[in-house]
Image (cartoon, grey):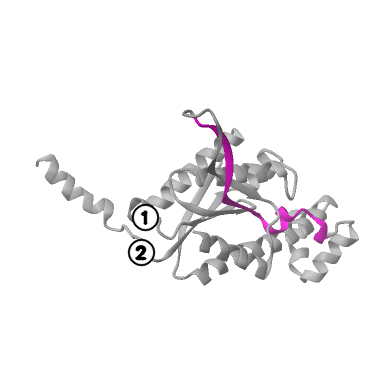
Amino acid sequence: MKFDELDEKMRVFETAHDLCVLPGVYMVARLDGRGFTRLTKEVHAFESPFDVRVRDLMVATTGHLMNCGLRVVYGYTQSDEISLLFHPREDSFGRKTRKLNSILAGEASAKFSLLLGDLGAFDCRICELPNAELVRDYFRWRNEDAHRNALNAHGYWSLRREGKGVEEATNAMLRLSVAQKNELLFQRGIHFNELPNWQKRGTGLYWETYAKEALDPRTGEAVFAERRRIKVDFELPMKDAYSDFVRSLLEAA
């Protein structure tokens, strides 16, 4: 059998399950760290429940994904997860989900591992959202999830520091309402509303333009050129204000 015939025969098995995101459908990639609780709390013993060093590793990894050849309008990270909003007209790899998933998971895993100096792995899945309202809802969901996770994490680790075991602390938090969780922290000198916003809301990364001074080689005069760079925002808004913020990014795109 000639190579061309063999190649055509076997390619069918490789591409039979290729799925592509339809044109006009928004794409958001969601990446999650694999085994990050053990990696960050046991292997490397970062501060619990939040450590600025882990935050910065995740921010740097998100920034790398926004610069790896795909048009990403917005990157969002909280805890061990990353969400990437693609430009509506992004069409790399024919919008094949398996290609996007594998490339993004590989890029994130490689970058995070190099920064940490140890193996850190991510999975990835593509969310297909048919309209801009659902895009806003998606990021609103992750933003509010960050708030819930922060409240639970601070409560859980407060109990752990008092000597309670994993199961005991977990069960104690399950029985509490949001108001009771806030009261638990308050009784231990923690004012939840005064905690850093990046812990409660996550961190956003988006593009901004700036003027860079340069020298015109023809005239020797100082000129300014417009450039783009990633802005890291640790003070994201919440609720409706956050939905409006995501809407503004979509409109700018």
Q: Are marks 1 and 2 in contact (CB under 8 Å)?
A: yes
Pointer 1 residue: 91
Query: The magenta stretch spans which residues?
Result: 192-216
- Residue 103 at x, y = what percent? 42, 46
Among numbered discs 1 and 2, the one appearing first in the sequence: 2
Label 2 crowd bin: few (<14), some (14–19), many (20+), radius 10 Å: some
Q: Where residue 23 is drawn, which disc sits there?
A: 2
Indicate the position of residue 68 as horizontal and vertical percent values. Answer: 46, 43
Residue 45, x across and y down, in percent: 71, 40
Residue 122 belongs to magenta span: no
Q: Is residue 117 left or right of residue 153?
A: left
Residue 222 versus residue 197: which sits nearer the camera? 222
User: Is 210 included in the stretch rendered in magenta?
Assistant: yes
Residue located 22% across and 53% down the image: 12
- Given the current orientation, which residue lies at the most extreme left position? 1
- Residue beneath the point at 64% across and 45% down: 38
Q: Residue at x 72, y 58 (%)?
A: 200
- The reply to whether residue 119 is visible in this rendering is no
The residue shown at (63%, 48%) is 232
Instruction: Decide which of 248, 133 is in the foreground and name it.
Output: 248
